[in-house]
Structure formats: structure tokens, C-alpha cells
Amino acid sequence: MNQNLLLYGKRVCFIGAHPDDIELGCGALIANIENKAEMLCVTLSDNQKNPTLKNLVQEHRASMHVLGIPQDHDILQQFETRNFPYARQEILETMLKIKRDFKPQIVFVHTKNDIHQDHITVTEEALRAFRGTSVLGFDVLRSSYGFFPHFLFEVTEQDVQKKMDALAQYTTYADRYYFDSQITRSTMIRHGALAERKYAEGFDILRVVAQFGSSCEE
């Protein structure tokens, strides 16, 4: 029987550029570890300069609530969407503060195979800020290009459903193809197939800092 690698982390941080990014990339994982680790979710833009997205903050809060993230661990910043490259120093300083205050043991950011300028900046600055920390990259379908997961995290049917329920809170995006529940489920089925599991959420490896232990029980 295949065995899973066991991860241990008391503090896990998820950093995304925009509302919905973290849920799209990591929703099932967050649901899976809700009672296993302290989580901090940081979204760097609230997208409130766009007049068509005025309900987005409320929808984001509702989505994170479905996943079990309390509001004091769901941080929304006000960096301007599509202008992250011009604010990279301030973004770096924001991440350094997260590192000092929260001290995450694992950090999740956008995959390096993402072509959105804001997503690229988040990942580049995270790799600078969290030099001594394991960093994994999540995929956001609408802006990915050539993503292939090399780190597969097994999730359950319940986790998959919670992710879909969380994404359903974004009524603003209800007609977007990447919010289609069939796409959400089929992506996790595909990643599960790669791992010979029923469902999995997929990430790429940006940096892993580890040591080998010999105390695992058979």
C-alpha cells in the first residue's frame, strides 16, 4: 500500500495577490488542515478600486469562513491590482513583517508558472522574504501557463466539497469558467490520479527545507 509523506507544521501561511486566489489554489488543503495547524491567509489586494467588484470583500470573508479561517487570520491588504511590480519593496516589507510576527514553517504562494504580473511579484518577493522556509506554489487556472504539480497533497471528498462551497460564495464571479464546480472537482481528480489517490491538491516545489527523521512508526 502506498504511504503518504507526513508533513508537520504548527504555523502555515498562505499568500495570494487577490481575493479568490488562495481558495482557488489551496481551498481543499486549508479545509484538510483546519484543525491541525494555525493558518494565516494574506491577500495583498482587496480589488476595491474596481467599481464592479464592490461585493468582493464580503464574498471573500464568507469564503474563508466556509474554510474555517477566522477573520483575524484572514488579512486583506490594499495594494493596487496590476501594479504590484511597482510596489515590490512594500510587498517585501509586508512579507518580512509576516515572517517576524507569525513565524510560518510552511508558506504557500503562486506557482512560478503563473503569468499574471501581480502573482509573479508575490512569488518573487516571498522567495526573498522566506529564505529559510519551505515554500510551495499553488495554481490559479486563469493565469497559469505550463503548471505541473510535483507536490501532491491528498485531500478527502469532504475537503473537495468545502472548497467548492467556499468558491460558491463568490457570486461576483459565478459566470467565470474557472469557478465551475466541475472544473474544480476534475482538477483534484486529475491530481489525485497522478498520486494514485482519489483526490489531491497539486503544488510546485519552490523551496523545501527539511531534515530526515528515523522515528516514524510502521
Image (spheres, rainbow, N blue to C red):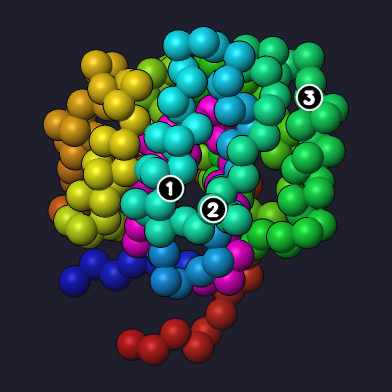
Residue 16 among those drawn in magenta: yes
* Residue type indicated by callout 1: Met
| Residue marked by disc 2 | 71
Cα distance, mark 1 to mark 2?
A: 8 Å
Q: Quadrant of residue 158?
A: bottom left
* Residue type indicated by callout 2: Gln
Residue 45 among those drawn in magenta: no
Residue 10's mark?
none
Q: Residue at x 34, y 52 (%)?
A: 66
Q: Residue at x 60, y 65 (%)?
A: 11
Could you say which is closer to the camera, residue 169 or residue 126?
169
Q: Position of residue 19 (x, y in %)?
A: 49, 31
| Residue marked by disc 1 | 64
Could you say which is closer to the camera, residue 115 or residue 40?
40
User: Is 210 rendered above or below residue 213?
Assistant: above
Could you say which is closer to the camera, residue 55 or residue 130?
55
